[in-house]
Image (cartoon, rainbow, N blue to C red):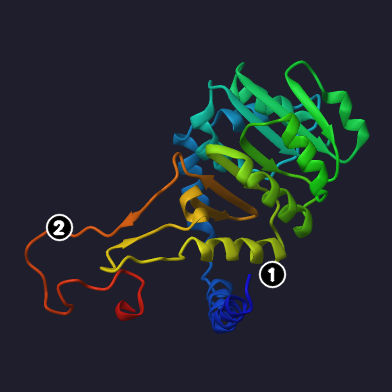
Amino acid sequence: MNRTRAEELSTELARALPLVTSGFAFAENWPTAVAECREARRALEQVKANPLRDYFDAHQAGRGIWKWAHYFDIYHQYFRKFVGREVAVLEIGVYSGGSLEMWRNYFGPHCRVYGVDIEEACRIYETDQVKIFIGDQADRSFWRDFKEQVPELDVVIDDGGHHAPQQIAALEELLPHLRPGGLYLCEDVNRIHNRFTAYVSGLMNHLNATLFTDDNLAAIPTPFQGAIAAIHSYPFVVVIERTEASVERFISLRHGTEWQPFYDAKPAAAGSPEKQ
């Protein structure tokens, strides 16, 4: 990055900081509505089927699975499109091996499951259907070797060390490695002012980068915008979706014949300074 661009980014971040603080304060003072939330949750659970949650609830013995309860709805929302298909799934953080069995059961017989853990003892969970790799998720040379052995991935679940440098290294190495339509899910992104959250905020800001054409009604995506469909944030979880196919152009469409005279015939694109 050249010095001029770095200075521009530094200035933009300085301007954004008060808004970050303001948004945090707004969330901090959100009114309490515990009773309503509990009633809505109970009603939702009665109508939503979730085979992952059913599997977990029935798993009372055997290899350990340790997950926050609300993760299962997030998993099923994004992962169900892969059920029954040929899918390559990586979970960082094997621990007691139970979740590897869960993924295999959920995705079906055409699923290939990979597990990564820093503890050598986790090799005992390797089977014909599950391949275990031992290494540090913060070690980029480990990921280079891993990618040579596993050339394709559709789903990455980071339940590893939970420290920002580890999470960032794994994301930077594996997000570009996902096939089109793939999903990257990082768990246990907790604690206020989490450094991984700050990093992801930078990714989210880049989703709004624009290179407008002359008429300001079309924009040329950056390579990142062309490859990333969306970034979602949930309590303790970040989900990143790869595009099914690279986006070549964003277009602002106008339909209709009657327009208020507030802007000229070619209004500035949404998000430009003229429309703020």
Q: Mark 2 falls on what kind of element?
A: loop
The answer, for residue 103, to whether it is visible in the render is yes
Which residue occupies the extreme front position in the image?
Answer: 2
Q: Mark 1 falls on what kind of element?
A: loop
| Disc 1: which residue | 193
Q: Residue at x 50, y 43 (%)?
A: 42
Labelled pair 1, 2 in contact (Cβ < 8 Å): no
Q: Amino acid at mark 1?
A: His
* Residue 164 falls in image quadrant: bottom right
On screen, 108 above or below 145? above
Q: Residue at x 27, y 60 (%)?
A: 252
Q: Residue at x 23, y 57 (%)?
A: 253
Q: x, y percentage for residue 268? A: 27, 73
| Disc 2: which residue | 255
Q: Earlier in the sequence, mark 1 or mark 2?
A: 1
* Dot 1 alpha-carbon crowd within 10 angstroms: few under 14, some 14 to 19, many 20 or more: few
* Front position in the image: 74 or 174: 174
- Quadrant where the C terminus sits is bottom left
Q: Relative to residue 230, is residue 110 drawn left or right?
A: right
The answer, for residue 57, to whether it is visible in the render is no
- Quadrant where the N terminus sits is bottom right
* Front position in the image: 15 or 146: 146
Q: Relative to residue 81, is residue 196 drawn left or right?
A: right
Q: Amino acid at mark 2?
A: His
* Residue 203 falls in image quadrant: bottom right
Q: x, y percentage for residue 121? A: 92, 32
Q: x, y percentage for residue 9? A: 58, 77
Q: Residue at x 55, y 35 (%)?
A: 79
* Residue 110 falls in image quadrant: top right
